[in-house]
Structures are given as structure tokens and as C-alpha cells.
Image: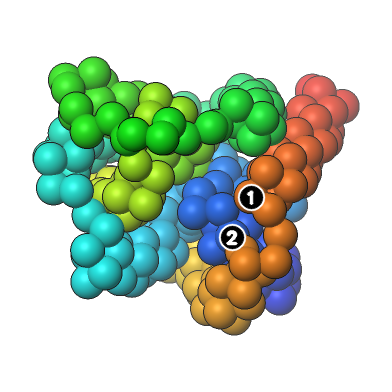
Amino acid sequence: METNIILFIVVGFLAQMIDGALGMAYGVSSNTFLLSLGIPPAAASASVHMAEVVTTGISGFSHWKLGNVNWKLVRRLLIPGVIGGIIGAYVLTSIDGDIIKPYIAVYLLIMGGVIIYKAFTMIPRKKPDEYHGPRISILGLIGGFCDAVGGGGWGPVVTSTLVARGKHPLTTIGSVNFTEFFVALGQSILFIIALGFGEYWQIILGLLIGGAIAAPIAAKLAQKLPAKTLMIIVGTVIILLSIRTIYLTLQGA
């Protein structure tokens, strides 16, 4: 990789700051930044998810120890999420990066809009909805697929949808984070089989270093800034970077 590892550390730092403050959008944020640096879609998504195996493993374990995991919700999400993620990873590695890149940028642009929309509409109900029906499995399948193809989206698609439907915010975030480890692991295994590993070590290492530095700072940031403000800022940055990627892709066409 010609790009300096310092850039990947910065990307990992910014993405973890966002994720640590919001409880979502690590993948969407980091993948958007990587695409804007010219990293091919499959390489970007693979690197993000390999790094996420570590970060989501730590996060999921922490939520489990704190009692934030609802096992009924996990059972609904886990297998469909892994299946959707593997299918998405296979699709991404089977298509030429230059062809799919503008479509991924459009997806991320839409996700930026979704995050901003959720900032204004996510109002938790006074009494949480504790029914976890079959539709949640469909949501997990879609979330896993979008997460792999777009390099992120598990949190914005799954967490925000469930909270908006009235699920308990704390146990939803804990359960979705716990499940995300297995989704990221499944995707990473397929990416390693299809793409190999050695070529992307700088990206993965940079994301991990940046994320490790940002984690404690992000926790404090979450206490200072309102979630609504952060979501609007994050959504706006993702939209602007996605527009830039689309513009550069069209210019080179």
C-alpha cells in the first residue's frame, strides 16, 4: 500500500470516536474514509471487518459482562446476520471494484441520510417493546448483507431500526454489538479466502491502533455531546465524503 499507515491510524481514530460516542457507524465511517483515499471497495470492507473482529469482540464481551445482552434478540439476529454478511462479502469479491465503487458510495450516501433522519426521529418509547418476532431475523439478514457490501451498516441498519421500533436502547445496543462479532468474523473468513491477508496489513493495523487510542476519549465525548448532534455531524461527513467519491469516480470514467 502506497498510502502511509498514519492515514489509516487517523481513519481508525475518527471511526472509533464516532462509534464510541454513538454506539454505531464504525464500519460506515471507516469505509467511507477508506474509499475517499482510493482504497478498492473489497479491500476497504475486508480491512474494516478484520479490524472489527477485535473491536466488536471486546465490545460484545463487555456488554455481556455488564448484562446488556438479550439472548432472545441475539438468537433472532445471529444466524441471519452471519448468512447475510457472507452473501454480501461473496458478492463484493465477485465484482470488479471500479464498477461497484460508485454504487457503494451511493449506498453510503444514503446511510448518511439515514443517520441524520434517525437523529430527528429516534424517540424511545416509555415502555420498551419486548417482543422479538421473525421480522427481526429478516432485518438481521438485510443488515448483514448491507454491512458486507457497504463496508459497514450493521449498527445504523439494525440498531437504529430496533430502537426506533421501541426496543430497549441499552439491551438493543448490547445485543447488536455482541452479534456483530460473529457477523464480522464470518465476513472476514470469506474475505481472507477470496482476497488473502498480507496486502492489507497496514490498513488493518492502522485501524486497530487508531481505534485503541480513540476508545477512552470517545467514551468521554459521549458524555459531553448530545447523541442527536453527533449523529447529524456524522451523517453530514459521510454524505460529503460519499459525494466526493462519486464525483471522482465519474471524473475518471
To which quarter of the image does residue 140 belong? top left
The amino acid type of the residue labelled 1 equals Ala
Q: Earlier in the sequence, mark 2 or mark 1?
A: 2
* Left or right for 126, reference 230: left
Could you give the CA–CA distance between mark 2 and mark 1, rounded to whole angstroms?
A: 7 Å
Q: Is residue 112 above or below residue 190?
A: above
Most foreground residue, 178 or 30: 178
Residue that appears at 19% across and 29% down: 132
- Amino acid at dot 2: Ala
Residue 21: numbered disc:
2
Q: Residue at x 61, y 64 (%)?
A: 222
Query: Which dot, 2 or 1, sits closer to the camera?
Result: 1
Can the viewer see residue 1 in this picture?
A: no
User: In which quadrant of the rendered view does residue 129 lie?
Assistant: top left
- Residues marked 2 and 1 touching at CB (< 8 Å): yes
Q: Residue 7 versus residue 253: which sits nearer the camera?
A: 7
What x and y, as percent, mark residue 41? Answer: 56, 40
Q: Secondary structure at mark 2?
A: helix
Label disc, if present, on residue 227 of the rendered structure: 1
Q: Position of residue 181 (x, y in %)?
A: 29, 56
Point 41% across, 60% down: residue: 52
